[in-house]
Amino acid sequence: MSDLQSTGHRDIAELHFEVHPSVLFKLGEDLITDDAQALVELIKNSYDADAQTVRVEIDTEHWYDRVSGEQLETDMASPAGAVRGRLTVQDDGHGMSLDAIKRGWLTVSNSEKRVFKSKGLTTARDRTPLGDKGLGRLGVQRLGHLVGLTTVAAEPGGQARHELMIDWASFFDAENLSSVLLAVSSEPALGARTGSTVSVLGLKNRGYWEGTGELDLQKQLVSILSPYENAAGLRVFIKINGAEVDMRREARRLLDAAPNILQFSFRDGILEIGAKTQVSALRGQSAVQSATFQQLISPDNGHAFAEWLLSEHASRAKAVGAELGDDKYFLRFQRKLAFDDAVDPRFNAGDPGPFSGELSSFTYGRAEDSALDSASELRDFARSVAGIRVFRDGFGIRLDDDWLGLSAQQTTATSFYGLRPLNTAGFVNLSARDNAALEETSSREAFRDTPAWRGFFQLMIQVVKFARETQELVRRNWTIYAREHTTPSELSDTATPSDIGGHIVARASEALKSRSRAQSARRTLNSLDRIVEDLSTSAQDSALSMWTDPKLREAVDKAASQISDAQSQLVSALGEVDSILGVLDDLRGAAALLEEKLTLAEERISNAWESVALGLSAEILAHEVDQISDRLRGRSHQILDYLRKQQPIDTRTVAYVEHVRASSAELTRQVARLNPALRFRRETRSTHLVSELILSAAEFHGPRLKAARINLAMETVQDFRIRVNEGKFMQVIDNLIRNSEYWVTRHLLQKHIETGEITVTIDSPRVIVSDNGPGVQPSVEDTLFEPFITMKPMTEGRGLGLFVVSQLLDSEGGSIALGEHRNKGGRPDTFEVDLRGLLEGDANPAGSAE
């Protein structure tokens, strides 16, 4: 505050803002959420100072002098003038000059790094500074009661050592920050190595560093420092109470032991994903599963199964780039995606810059040879590091544990093969230089919602999706392979649940017949006891007689004959038992197939239920809207007649009623498109000229598409008539047009084209739909019409649209396939609907179009 100035009758005082010391502590608590984050900010400072080595030592046991910082040797419970616990961060960086201490360390939110970084400059070791907000050092005060700084730096007059001790208690009673004076001692340090040492004395949260167990601490450290790769030339060593903490060895062991490994990288607009699978992923948990694994997989390390998979399911295998692997990873997969194919432009997603990473998914097996069995130390480590973590130059960005939403994608079905949050570990590596557009929040615990973040997130969702596709291919078909090669059955893979149920009933009836015959044989076997008893009695009586009894011989012969007959029946009965066992084996195979079919059906029904519910809602809505609009048209007509008879005529009211009537008529027209598809009209078939049906679709979709800069054109080469259910056919055409609309819209938003084009060509006996979108991606060319196959984001499509089209056409006698024509990018861009099975009479009653 300046002196009071007098101007006439008014006194003017010149004031300025002061900062109360409590603000400093409040900022530290709010911006640095815990002790681990405070520690990493100190290590980042060492990184920015071009350090090669950082040594962190944490001591929670000893006492230290409050003034000198020296360790005290004392048995006292709480010695006077002392504090307990010390955290030290020592580096070999370039140190800080006295001016840097003043303008950097002691000036809140002033950061020369921010300017340095904005100019695209790098340090002598080619590093882009990580700290640029000038707030990281505020975390130091939350760690302990005192902080000491010792630094050696090269200055114009030669190397100098500067020392500073801050006792946070001196700020508690101060009126403002400037009233607390801090003494910095300086002296020449010729020949000394440059670097800085920050010592925090009197740890406020010793229990945090001691933890309830070593793994709890490991989990905290993994969140701030990458256990997978070093931060660009920086080695960090951590000791806690004298014990070295080494996470890198265990992290590498975990990645190598996991049965499923997925590696990915994004660079120059291309996302490359590669996955590999060990045979241990097929082992299973039960004794039966383990025995099947030993029988079918162990002898050749899964080679026969892999070859069967690639030949029997070639189209699905091609979609994920599957190929034979080696002795360690028996199957490998790969996929390449262009940025435009991977992200939805409607979310204004941008290129986040190059990044890479690795994920592993594992199960906590019970087998003795499993790296993650119940007795394994690695099992506990896996639980502590589970999650997909993001690191920038080796330093953790502490996102939510499930920031990719794996829990939301996981279903309760046992057939879910995607990544599970607790069974997945891995990392994503970013850099300050290459990923500057990915901006962290001040708390370092999230990214700002920017186009780069949205692009990065959608690329990672594609990685997660690929993981599910590969594991679903392997593990679902392993179930089929195991059943076919262990339990023979007369049923084929194409058998319906109804076929399977009938087969089980028939075979069970045979088993019941065999059981009754076996029971009869058992009764005969029981008679042997009486026969033997009679034989024994006769023999004893004969032995007591002086003369041999002739009847004894007869009895013995008869008994021998009866025993022979009984033995024959026993052999026959045993044969029946063998037959029963065969039937039971067959029943077990049939039951297993039925269970698999039902599980798959349940999963698909679950995925499709929203569409079913939407269809039911549309059916009800169409009926109700039709009734409402009809009543509205009638009432508006009555009101219009009344208004026109009034004098003078209220033109504004008349115009409004006319508008209402016209709008209700349009609403009726729109709803009418749903009416032919309603359940009660589904089975009605009638003869239609194809051009008239397509024209109706063009009139319906045209205005909406035109507003989106998409032209919908109809071309007639040779018209023809078909006998078809109108609702089904219109649903086919609607789905094809909407499919083209989605991809053409993406192409427009990505500025690859200026105007969208969708063309429907009528050329007896086909209808051809083409567009100028990106075309069909190679990975799904062979599986496009199968259920749940889609390259849309998971939130945008279920992969049912084209499957529904194929099913509707099949029910009417038609079919659909990709056309042979390819666009400039070499991708198929046409759908050909073959309607020759629906032709009625002359194939071309309408004649050729001019």
Image: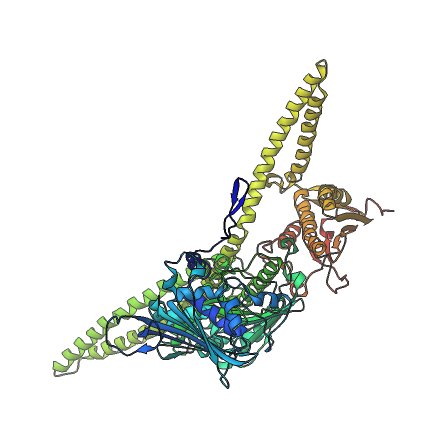
Can you name the residue that lies furthest to the top here?
Answer: 647
Quadrant position of residue 197: bottom left
Quadrant position of residue 826: bottom right
Say if residue 285 shows up in the picture. Answer: no
| Residue toward you, 391 or 281 | 391
Can you name the residue that lies furthest to the bottom here?
Answer: 191
Image height check: is 94 above or below 144? below
Query: Where does residue 706 sit, x and y in percent of width and height?
Result: 74, 45
- Marks counted in the figure total 0
216 with respect to 497 (left or right): left
Query: Where does residue 176 sit, x and y in percent of width and height?
Result: 43, 57
Q: Give the residue displayed 49% in from the left and 84% down from the top.
A: 192
Image height check: is 148 above or below 642? below
18 with respect to 566 (left or right): right
Image height check: is 367 above or below 746? below
Figure coloring? rainbow
745 with respect to 74 (left or right): right
Query: Where does residue 318 sit, x and y in percent of width and height?
Result: 63, 69
793 with respect to 79 (left or right): right
Q: Give the residue displayed 42% in from the left and 62% down from the top.
A: 180
| Residue toward you, 569 or 538 | 569
Query: Where does residue 13 sit, x and y in percent of width and height?
Result: 51, 48
Say if residue 157 shows up in the picture. Answer: yes
